[in-house]
Amino acid sequence: MTSLLIGCGNLGTIILKGFISSKKEILVLENDNRIISSMTRIFKNVRFFKMLEKIDWEKISYIMLCVKPKDAINTLREIKKYCDKTHIIVSFVAGLQTKTISKIVLSKSPVIRIMPNIFVDSNNSSTAFFSNKISESLKKKVTKDFRSFGECIWLKNEKKMDFFTAMFGGGPAYFFYILDCFDQIIRKNGVSGDDSLSLLITLLEGTLIKLKSRNVDFKKSIKNVASKGGTTEEALKVFDKNSALFNLFNTAINSAKQKSSQISKQLK
Ligand SMILES: NC(=O)c1ccc[n+]([C@@H]2O[C@H](COP(=O)([O-])OP(=O)(O)OC[C@H]3O[C@@H](n4cnc5c(N)ncnc54)[C@H](OP(=O)(O)O)[C@@H]3O)[C@@H](O)[C@H]2O)c1
């Protein structure tokens, strides 16, 4: 089984590494000459292509579309004549609907949307899958073939992809944003950069251990730290005032969700 990855940018490179480390055969189609030359040096056993006609399409099982939304429609139009029902089309493109893909490609190929995040590289992506019409056995196969991505969930309704794109596709950036805020505060209070990083890692590791025990009650855990009349309570009052922090996160995720929905409409 050989897969074809179209687009080897930020996400594509991570997916490529995952395929290589799980010893799956993969070919790459990429536009950018600089990417091709640097990747050929790193991944010596992978074949990179620029021309569609040089690819042996009969050998391909998964066609993985990993280009920016603005390039997705043209890319699909370009590959259309090579696609047949033996191919399984997997799209990582934010906002691009499965029915739009089927409409362009015009083959009877199963179309699957996958929304991972960059933590695919450590097998820790919280990933959403959607397909309109695939058999249970194909669903099982896809789940197995992409198991290395991390935690996966099959959605029943494609509309939910907008939320998963906003929440989990972008999720790593939000955590890094929050950590950057804490890091700046720690440094402002006279702690060196290296120490700040070590302390933050330990703080996160402790939180993760608690989370992984699976019997964590968020409200109770907050109370365990914030004793009445204590210091943490003062910080929490600021977060909580008129649900300020919750509202900020909620508005931010909704805004990303709307953007995903807007991209879907533009890509119809
Ligand atoms: N980055 C993330 O964390 C993340 C998470 C979830 C989903 N996604 C989705 O993944 C997709 C890719 O994102 P990205 O950040 O990896 O984009 P990116 O870094 O821009 O990579 C896309 C690559 O595809 C190439 N390309 C475009 N059209 C092509 C074609 N027809 N044939 C071959 N190569 C082509 C581009 O080359 P040129 O620039 O030269 O055209 C570029 O090198 C997006 O649709 C995004 O919504 C990304």
Image: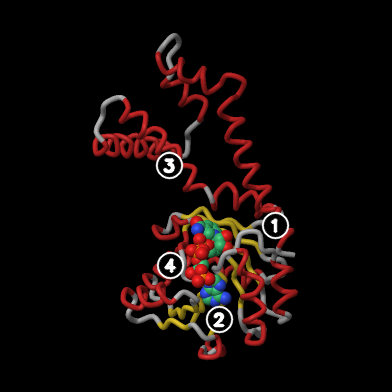
> Which mark lies nearer to you, 3 or 4?
4
Q: Amino acid at mark 3?
A: Lys
Q: Label 1: which residue?
A: 156
User: In which quadrant is the C terminus drawn?
Assistant: bottom right
Instruction: Name which residue lies at 44% across and 9% down.
Output: 229
At 24% from the left and 35% from the top, the residue drawn is: 195
Q: Earlier in the sequence, mark 4 or mark 2?
A: 4
Left or right: residue 150 versus residue 23 is right
SS of the residue under disc 3: helix
Q: Position of residue 73 (x, y in %)?
A: 66, 71
Residue wearing tag 4: 13
Residue kind at label 2, given as amino acid type: Ser
**Quick one: label 4, few (<14), some, or many (20+) residues within 10 Å?**
some
The residue labelled by disc 2 is 61
Residue 77 higher or lower than 252, as above or below? below
Residues at circles 3 and 4 in contact by the CB criterion of under 8 Å:
no
Q: Three-letter amino acid code at disc 4? A: Thr
Marks 4 and 2, how far apart in space? 19 Å
